[in-house]
Amino acid sequence: MSRQEKSIVRSLMVSLRDLYCGTSKKLSVSRNVICSKCSCSGCKGSGVKLVKVYYYGLVVQPCNECRGTGERETMSNNCCPGCKGDKVVQEKKIVEVHVEQGMKNGQMITFPGEGNQAPKTDSGDIVVVLVQWSHPKFQRMGDNLAVEHTLSLTEALSGFQFALTHLDGRKFLIETNPVEIVKPDSYKTVNDEGMPVHKKPDMKGKLEDLRNEEIKIKQAQAPEVYDEDDYMHRAAEMCSQQ
Ligand SMILES: [Zn+2]
Ligand SMILES: [Zn+2]
C-alpha cells in the first residue's frame, strides 16, 4: 500500500485563555471506514497483512483469508446491506485535541491514520487547525501579550496603580513610580507575564520565567488636541499647583 487517503481538515475554535493555560477539547469528525459486513475481517479490506517471519521480522504478505482481495468471500459486494457496494461506511470519530500551553492561532495538530479509510489504501490523517477568537482585553504578539489601559490625566502625572486580572484569573498589581510622568501611548513592560513558550526543549518546566507582557498605557482623551510640548507644559503646571 503506498497511496494514502486525503487528510480531513477541521478547525477548532479556542480562546486565548485556552492557549495560555492549555486545555483538552473533544471534536466530532465524520469519516469513511471500511465496511465490516463485506470486507475481510483478517486484513480489514486492505488485502495484505503484516506477518512475522523468522529472521526477517515483520513482512507484508497477501492476506490468506481473502487471498488478497480484501473482500469477504461469502458476500456478493453489490448487495451488501452495510455499504450497498461502496465498501466504506460513514461513522463519527471523536478526537481528543490536547491544546498545549503556548500553541498559536493557525497551528495544526495531526492525528496520523485517523481519517478516511478506503480499500487497499493507507488511511488518511485528521488535521485540526486551531483558530483563536480575539480576546476583549489581551492581544497576542508572538510570545508577548498587550493590554490597553486608559489613564486619567491626574494618574498620568502623579502615578497610578491598578489590579490586572490575567488570563488564568490571577490578579496582579501594575503600578508606576509616584514621580513618573506617563506620556500618551507609552508602554510599560512586565517581565514573565506574557504567553508561555510552546515546546522550548531547553527551557522545559520554566514557562513562567519566559513570559513577557507589555502593558500599553493609553492617555485618556483630553477635551482638546494638544501636542507633546503643550502636554509637558500642562504637566509642569499641575506639578507646580500641588
Ligand atoms: Zn483479507
Ligand atoms: Zn459492505
Image: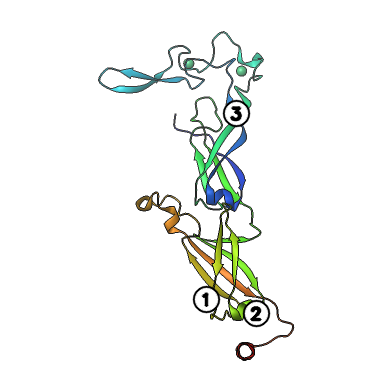
Mark 3 — residue? 32
- Name the amino acid type tagged 3: Asn
Mark 1, residue position: 177
Q: Earlier in the sequence, mark 1 or mark 3?
A: 3
At 70% from the left and 85% from the top, the residue drawn is 225
Distance between mark 2 and mark 1 Cα atoms: 14 Å
Disc 2 is placed on an element classified as: helix
Name the residue located 61 percent from the left edge and 34 percent from the top edge. Answer: 29
**Between marks 3 and 2 in the image, the one whose residue lies nearer the viewer:** 2
Q: Is 42 left or right of 165, judged from the image as shown? A: left
- How far from the left and from the top, in percent, is residue 210? 43, 58
**Does dot 1 land on a helix, a strand or a loop?**
loop
Q: Is residue 148 visible?
A: yes
Residue located at (58% from left, 51% from top): 17
Q: Residue furthest front?
A: 242
Q: In front: mark 1 or mark 3?
A: 1
Location of the N terminus (image quadrant): top left
Marker disc for residue 154: 2
Residue 184 visible to an observer of this rendering: no
Chain-order first, disc 3 or disc 2: 3
Residue 165 at what x, y percent from top left?
Answer: 60, 58
Mark 3 vs mark 2, CA separation in Å? 65 Å
Query: Badge 3, how many Cα within 10 Å: few under 14, some, many 20+?
Result: some
Amino acid at circle 1: Asn
Q: CA distance from mark 1 to mark 3?
A: 63 Å
Q: Quick check: is the Cβ at mark 1 less than 8 Å away from ligand 2?
A: no
Q: Position of residue 217 (x, y in %)?
A: 59, 72
Residue at the limit of the structure toward the right, as seen here: 223
Q: Residues within 10 Å of mark 1 (few under 14, many from 20)?
A: few
Number of numbered labels in the structure image: 3
